[in-house]
Amino acid sequence: MRGRWIGGPQGLRQGDRGLDECQKVGTGSGGRDGALLAFAGLPAGIALAAAGASVPCSGPGGGAAGLIAAVNAANSGGGGTIGLAAGCTYRLTKAGNSGALGPNGLPVITSAITIKGNGATIARRSSQPFRILEVDGPGGNLTLQNLTITGGDTPGPGGGMFNFAGRLVLDATVVTGNASEGNEMSSGGGIASGTLQNGPAGTLVLNASQVTRNSTSGAAGGILNHAGTAVLNSSQVTFKHRG
């Protein structure tokens, strides 16, 4: 999977402008719909509030299992908002599904979902390789706010996250310590976004966010954008490359 490098082995490919400037790579556009509040069938312990579902750090309906249940409920209900406990680490210990190009810890995002991190972390804690999450278009539309994504490890594209022709927005979010290694499709150590076809498809937006210290054995240690749109606003991308 080859595309335009952002923070990859050869650095930023957009006139070498600073990463604190707005960067656009590729073509295409995507709308952003408001999240719907529909959470049927949530397990006990997950609180329903006016803003959506709140997943505690531990206990009934909490932790990684509670987060997985909340994402499943949001997908089933057509979208929603999920709030995480401040400062909590939600530890994913096994892959929950196999997406288009490899397993994921969280359910594949297929609707409009916002996850309000409140300084929380979603991390892979397993000997089993898998990325943290995948967004699938055309319906997948994920916004992450004030969250850290770390520990993802996959031979496929997108060590931390794979946006497959959907829409992925990061607000004040950090993607760090993820890897995409060991396969001819390895690319985008932190994030891979776009489509396997000619495109344009897939939109990635970073607002005041960081993609740092991710690695790949292929192309683009930071972000790979292939036949899609990537926009960086006041954001930083660095990388660790492993040949």
Image (cartoon, rainbow, N blue to C red):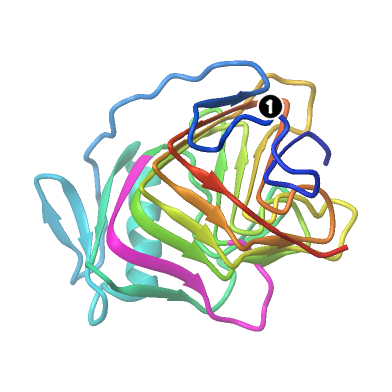
Badge 1 amino acid: Gln
Look at 23% across and 67% down and name the residue there.
85
Q: Quadrant of residue 5?
A: top right
Residue extending farthest left: 50
Percent coordinates x, y for residue 39 in the rendering: 25, 48
The answer to whether residue 124 is magenta is yes
Residue pointed to by mark 1: 14
Q: Quadrant of residue 91?
A: bottom left
Classify mark 1: helix, strand or loop. loop
Q: Is residue 88 left or right of residue 90?
A: left
Residue range highlighted in magenta: 113-131
Depth check, front residue: 196 or 99: 196
Q: Pick the quarter of the image with the N terminus.
A: top right
Q: Quadrant of residue 171?
A: top left
Percent coordinates x, y for residue 26 in the rendering: 68, 22
Main secondary structure type of the part rendered in magenta: strand
